[in-house]
Structures are given as structure tokens and as C-alpha cells.
Image (spheres, rainbow, N blue to C red):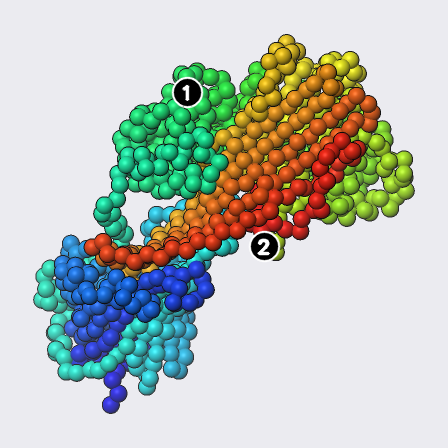
Amino acid sequence: MKNRILRRSQTRSHTTGLSLNNDRLYKLTYSTEVFLDRGKGKQQDSVGYRISSNVDVVLLWRNPDGDDDQLIQITMKDVNVENVNEQRGAKSIFKGKNPPKIIRKKNLEALQRPVLLHLIHGKVKEFYSYPNEPVAIENLKRGLASLFQMQLSSGTTNEVDISGDCKVTYQAHQDKVTKIKALDSCKIERPGFTTSNQVLGVTSKGTAVTTYKIEDSFVIAVFAEEIHAFRMNFLPTIAGNIVSKQKLELKTTEAGPRLMPGKQVAAIIKAVNSEYRALPIMGQNFQSECKGCPSLAEHWQSIRKHLQPDNLSKAEAARNFLAFIQHLRTAKREEILQILKAENKEVLPQLVDAVTSAQTSDSLDAILDFLDFKSDSSIVLQERFLYACGFASHPDEELLRALISKFKGSFGSNDIRETVMIIIGALVRKLCQNEGCKLKAVIEAKKLILGGLERTEKKEDTMMYLLALKNALLPEGIPLLLKYAEAEGPVSHLATTTLQRYDVHFITDEVKKTLNRIYHQNRKVHEKTVRTTAATIILNNNPSYMEVKNILLSIGELPKEMNKYMLAVVQDILRFETPASKMVRRVLKDMLAHNYDRFSKSGSSSAYTGYITRAPHLASTYSLDILYSGSGILRRSNLNIFQYIGKSHLHSSQVVIEAQGLEGLIAATPDEGEENLDSYAGMSAILFDVQLRPVTFFNGYSDLMSKMLSASGDPVSVVKGLILLTDHSQELQLQSGLKANMDVQGGLAIDISGAMEFSLWYRESKTRVKNRVALAIIGSMTVDSSFVKAGLEISAETETGLEFISTVQFSQYPFLVCMQMDKDGVPFRQFETKYERLSTGRGYISRRRKESLIAGSEFPLHQENSEMCNVVFAPEPESASSGWF
């Protein structure tokens, strides 16, 4: 007679599962192994471990009223721990150590104490174990016990096991039953978060399949495999797999204890051992103690030199920033506050970036206690805190409530008050993207923004609320934007650029009616910056035949440089094959719209879009448009960088330099509608979809003359600091009982600056925008049993820069224009670290490094009259190896 572990129940009226024979002792072998790799499936390149044992199973009790109601006892014996990678050899951390030394004596005793499993129709009714056992050890026993839960017929149902409450599908065959667990359906409390934007985000996937092998209607073996994989979307080399396997096989059966009589299972359990307690079969959370780890203060002292201002252009700064954030997330308010109070002013801004980016209740309490918004002596720190809030990867309602509360208070600086409201708008959008639009704080913030636009009397407050709406992108704010778009002055331009950020389905026919009125000046005269923005919105949002035709017919009737600019926009649409290109080509078949006179307009304004990177899975584009006044003075320079992955996109940066009212300096005539503009120049930026507070170079004629006389030509910083770019954390309960973690963090040290120089003597103007970034990305996986831990870390880092310079000589017409955009050479470094470590301290570690240099690039910008440029521009690159910036 064959060894048989389980048989079919004879009760046909139920969906039956495993059923043991009476008075038999089942002797089995069990192993669970886990290994981590980079998704290549080569076990020799992996790290991990295997836990194996013998297992005794007996049927203690069967309900006399139904065979499918059983109480079984499961006991692990002869436990052993070993390497999964058999090539480790003498480097094995287990070599020369017996199980009591590896697992620890008390843990081993707990692991080998039996558990009881109450099964009804093959499903777990209760799991019984001894109280006060180590959670990690109980989880290993839960993982083994969960294998005994199954059904012998096909179908989909919900089961509760160590993984949580999960949807499972059974597929019954003659010689096996397969159970497929939908891991994304499992309901179990575990900490975790992710970046909502898919471009910066992480794709993770889990599968779990258990196969029950059957011979002659009896289950003789169980094989389970669970795989978790992750991949960073914009950098697929940051990827990894966690593979967990379980194997339970019957070896022999022999005579066992007789069934215990009785009808109530509770009495049977008490008779076995009164110390047994019913515990959840779901895995329970635990944290391993970190022995010998530095304190928060010690960690900070070891890395602060890397965060000195002069070192922020190095990837080492971003890497240490990420490491310190991880430590801050486990720190208490008092520890954090102590470090903040002790730091000097040079490194303090970087510390504020890190504390704010930690995004815990303790870190928020500490930074709010530290900063005094009623004082104007710490404006830099207040601004760094607010921008870090705006870039928060997973903001919560608590953070938004804190900023609303601050906004209602008093401020030492009006700039900070404005920044608070602008960042409130950014948080509203992020919370709404994560289904948080109905949160009380979000509703209150919406009322603040929209109510402010409806009731405000100060021009400065109107601009502030418009900037907040530019971040929040509330659909209910569109009617207000249309009202302000047809107003006069700076609010009109800001309202139209805000509309420009809305998705295509919000740009309705009603919105486009207003935009057409603005562009064609049907009701009033508008500045050309407003008109060109209105036209761009129309052309980028499913324009109709007549809308395109009317825009084309207007070319030739516009001010000189606006003619050239609109012509460049149309040509860019055709060249870059944007969605509007088909409609434009259709209109151009009409010779009234498409003729030499219209398409031969001279001027220096331009619009150009190109690729920084182009690959099958992603693309990175840049666009630059420059609009001049008729006298050759810059009106607007707009540099944008977008990232695309599939259907997702990210507006990673925008730097706009604007100037107006400067014609009087060279005795030139202003363009129509711009005769009474005040002298002004400033810069505005969007960074990672967050609109920042604009920076003013000068405002008014007297301020202009003062700045010209004292100008040094040094750039003005728009944003500088450390940003937590990607933030993904998952804690996984493996069905084997082990705990796994998958984390991906991306950190950026960034400095965006701009400058505008103006020379009356040489009749020349120059604008300069410089982006300097250092990027570090760290992806890590760990699997922890509390007595042994394995980990794999994959990381990458780079430093790069992107610089745009535009020089105009307006001593003649057409003006001489030189535009340059250069990307520095990019060192790209990749690292891999693998380790296995016992709780006693013994460990194995392996490190690998790979470095490459990606050549710098010069990008075409569609310039004309380029004889004044000394640079010969290279052809547009097909792709750039790592390209992000």
C-alpha cells in the first residue's frame, strides 16, 4: 500500500479538502527557500537561504457529525538552515554552525513546539499556538500550516491564510490541484507607499501558485512558488526578484495516536494543552532589532560633510540624503529636533530637506516646532521646507492641515505666505490623484483657493491664488480662469498659462471660445504673450478645422515677431508630428491659408521641439520657444523638459524668463497693446509638476536702472536643494512565513538658476538658464526571518548639467540671434551589493561596480541668422544612453 497523506472526504454534499486517516502518524519533509536576484533567474548569482525540517502530522479529532471537521497537530523537527547558493562553499555564513547557534536556542524550541489546525471542509477555521512566542517564529509555522488549506474541486473563492484574506482560484485535474492566489487582492495590514506619477514610479507584480500532487485520490506532495518582482519605470536596470518556494512531501506513515473522543473542539484543545490560544492565521508584523547601528545623531555627523553646499553637485550628496531619510523615518521628534537645533546655517537647509522628505508625524512635528514663520530671519529654511512639502512623494492630510493652519497665521515674509498657498495647491492635486479629494482638509483647501480668487481685492493675492490653482488644477476653477484670462495685465497671462496645464478633456469648446476671442482680440487688445499662449492651447487640444484655419489666416496680420513666432509654432507641429499635425496638414491644402507670402515672414522668434532621449519604453523631450518684441528685446523665453513612459508623462522642468516695458531704454516703439507696460523682468519655474513661486529680477524703471548699474551678471537661483524624487516601499508577507521588503528611492540634488543681461552700449541682451543635477537611485530587497537576513541592493548615480544661452544683437533688423543648448558629458555609475547576515553578526557580502561615460550633446534649436554663433550644432541625437536630463 502506498504512503498516503490525505484522502478525499466521503461527504458529497460539501466542497471537500484535505482529510487525514484516523490513527496514523504522517512523516513528511518540509523545506522553504528564498533567493533574491536581478530577475535573470540564475541561482548562482543570487543570495538567500533554505530552512528545512522533518514534519509530523497527526489527526487528533474528527467531528462525529461530519468527516470534514478535523483538528490536526503539526510538529516541525530536526530544523536546519543552509545556503540556497551551493557555490558559496567556505564563504557560507552557516559553515561550522549548528541550528541552535544559527536560530538561537529559544527560537528553535519555539519553532519545534507543535501547532494545532482546525479545518472545516478543508479551510482553516482556527490556528492554535502557544502564547508569547516570537512573532517571526510563529509566522514560519503559519506558513507551513497554510499549505494544509485547500479544496479538491475547481472554483474561485476567498481564503484567509498567512498572506491575508485573498482571492484564490482552484483548477482541479486528475493528478493534481493547482491553487492560484491573486496577491494583489490580499487584505493584510502592512506599511507601504509609492510615488503616484508612473514616470517616477515603480512597477511591481506578485504571483503565487501552489500545486497539490495527487495519486490514487490522495495528496502526496505540495509545491508552492511565490515570486515578487519590481522594476523602476524610467530606469529598468533598477530591478529585482524575490523568489520563495515551499516543498512538503510525504515520506512514510506509521501507527499514530488514537482519535480523541468528543463533540466540542474546544474541549479537545484544552485536553491536549490548556496553554494553546487561538491566534490569527494571517502573518503578523515584526521588526528585527538593529544591533550596533549608529544613532540618528551619529549617522548625521558621518554624512553632513557630503551635504555641504559645495558638494551638492555630486551624486554622493543625493545618496547620503536618501540613506538619512530612511533613518529619520524611525526617529522620534525629540531626536530630530535636537539635530536641527545644533546644526549651523550652511548645512541646515539640506537637513531641512531631509527631515521634511521623511514624511512621518515625528519629522513633521519636529520641523514645525523648529521653524518660526513669524520671523523673517529664516526665510531660506522656510522656503526649503515648503518646496520639500510640494515635492512630497506621498503627502497625507496631516501635512495639508498643517499648511492651512500656517496660512491662517501671521508671517514675517509675504513671499513665504505666497509660497505656502502655492504649495497647498500642489498638495491638493497630489491628494486628489490618490483618491483623497473628499478629505476634509482638501475640501477646505479648495475653498481657500477658489474663494480667494472670487473675493480677493489685492493684485498680489490674485496672483498667489492663481499660482495655487496652477498647481491644484481644479476643474471647478476653470470658469474663474476664463474670467481672469480676459482681464488685463499679468493676471491675464498667468490665467492662460494655468489653463495650458489642464488635460485635454478639460479644454472644452466653451474654453476654446474664450481662447479664440483672446487670440483674435475680438473684444479687447491683449499682450502678445497672452495671445500666443491662447493659440498654443487651442492647437494642442484637438483643434477644429476652422480654428486652425483662422490661426493660419492671422499670420501676416500680426506684429512682426508674433508673425514669426506663430509660423514657427505651426512648423514645429508639422515637424514633430504632434496630434494637431493632421488637422494642420488638412488646412494647408487650402492655398488661401498656405501661400508664400504667409510662410516667408522674417523675424527671430522661434519654437522648436526635439528629443533628448528616445527609446522603445520611454522618451524625453525638450522644447524651447522664444518670443521677441518688435524692437528685438526678449519678451519670453520658455524652456520645457518632459518625460514620457507609455501614456504617462511628467513635466520635469520648465524655466520661463519674461521681460516687458524695456523699449524706452533704446527709444523703440512698443508693440500694439504693450504701450503702457511697466518695466519688468523675472523668472518662473515648474519642477516635477510643481509650480514654484516666481522670482523677480527687477520691477519698475528705477529698480531696473539700479540693477543695471550694480549688475554682476551672476545667475539668480530659482530652486536649489535636495529632492526625494522616487519613493516606493513595500513590506511583503511571504506565504512561507518570511518577511520581505522592496524599497526604491531616488534622490536629486538640484540647482536651477537663470540670468538676464542687458547692454545698451553693445545693444545686446543675453539670457542664461542653467540646470545642474546629481541623481542617485537605490533599489533594495531584503528577506528576514529574524535570525538570518539576505539582501540585494542595486543602485545607480550620475551628475549632469543642461545649459541654455540666448544672445540677441538688436542694432539692426532682423536681429542677430544665437541660441545654444548643451548637455554636459554624463558619468553613469551602477552598483550591486549582495549580502547574507546572521543575527549573531556573521555575514557574507559581495560588491560589483560598472561605470560608463555618456558623451555630452548640443541640441538644435531652429535658430536663424546664426552667423554670430561660433558653435556648429550637431545633428539631433537618436538617443542618449541613460537619458533623463
Q: Which mark is residue 481?
A: none
Q: Position of residue 152 (x, y in %)?
A: 35, 75
> 540 above or below 366?
below
**Foreground residue among 590 and 306:** 306
Q: Position of residue 134 (x, y in %)?
A: 19, 55
Residue found at the very far top of the displayed protein: 702
Disc tally is 2
Q: Which mark is residue 378?
A: 1
**Foreground residue among 228 and 316:** 316
Q: Is residue 801 left or right of residue 523?
A: left
Residue at 45% of width from left, 62% of height from top?
Answer: 39
Residue found at the very far front of the displayed protein: 870
Q: Quadrant of residue 130?
A: bottom left
Q: Position of residue 428 (x, y in %)?
A: 49, 34
Residue at 87% of width from left, 41% of height from top?
Answer: 594
Q: Which mark is residue 617?
A: 2
Amino acid bearing label 1: Ser
Q: Quadrant of residue 657?
A: top right
Q: Is residue 266 left or right of residue 405?
A: left
**Foreground residue among 345 and 469:** 345
Question: Circle 2 — which element?
Answer: loop
Residue at 30% of width from left, 58% of height from top?
Answer: 844
**Foreground residue among 459 and 730:** 730
Amino acid bearing label 2: His
Instruction: Mark 2 or mark 1: name the one nearer the start of the chain.
Output: 1
Q: Residues within 10 Å of mark 2 (few under 14, many from 20)?
A: few
Q: Residues within 10 Å of mark 1 (few under 14, many from 20)?
A: some
Please state, as top left, top right, bottom left or bottom right, where the N terminus lies in the image.
bottom left
Q: Quadrant of residue 551?
A: top right
